[in-house]
Amino acid sequence: MSAPEPKLADQIAPGASGLEQLQAMIAAGGRAPIGETLEFSLTEAGDGWAAFEGLPGRHAYNPIGTVHGGYAATLLDSACGCAVHSKLSAKQAYTTLDLKVSYHRPLTDKTGLVRAEGRVATFGRRAAFAEATIKDARGRIYATATSSLLVFER
């Protein structure tokens, strides 16, 4: 059995705090493998918040002719998760426990660039809670989410 592949953040900035890892990832292009697949990138991160930008398009369409809800859910989960990631010490990790998504309007290939912004609501020793929104360039909301995340020692 081979050893597990190191986490992307550890490959980019080993031994760094969560925020330092995210900032190194942004400097390196801001894309995890899922960002390559769905065409979105981490663009900004600060203490307790993170932002992703993506261009929804036909690559993510569902059979009814709009962007699949999983695209929005993935952006929102990434924004919530990386907001929490920004609060981690070098010895901590996290995982999403739940994600509640509300869809306000459909995304299409005509929507243009969207921005998912996540913010930590509370950060505790074992659990964190975050919220996120997806907005277009005009500030219209397309989806919102709340998330509970487990924080643990590596």
Image: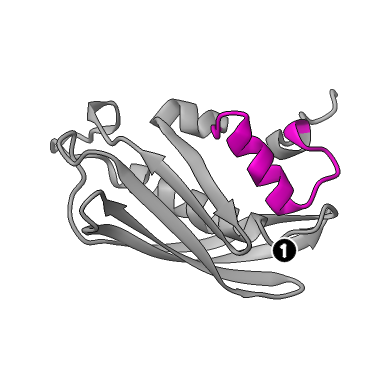
Q: Nearer the viewer, residue 111 or 3?
A: 111
**Residue 61 in sight here:** yes
The picture places residue 90, in percent across and down from the top left corner, at: 83, 52
Quarter where residue 48 is shown: bottom right
* Residue at x 83%, y 38% (from the top left corner): 14
Q: In this picture, is 5 found above or below 23? A: above
Q: Nearer the viewer, residue 134 or 20?
A: 20
Q: Nearer the viewer, residue 10 or 23?
A: 23
Report the amino acid beneath label 1: Val
Find out whether residue 139 is within the magenta segment. Answer: no
Quarter where residue 117 is shown: bottom left
The picture places residue 116, in percent across and down from the top left corner, at: 40, 52
Find out whether residue 26 is within the magenta segment. Answer: yes
Q: Is residue 102 left or right of residue 36?
A: left
Question: Which region shows up in magenta?
Answer: 11-31
Q: In this picture, is 7 found above or below 129? A: above
Q: Is residue 88 left or right of residue 64?
A: right
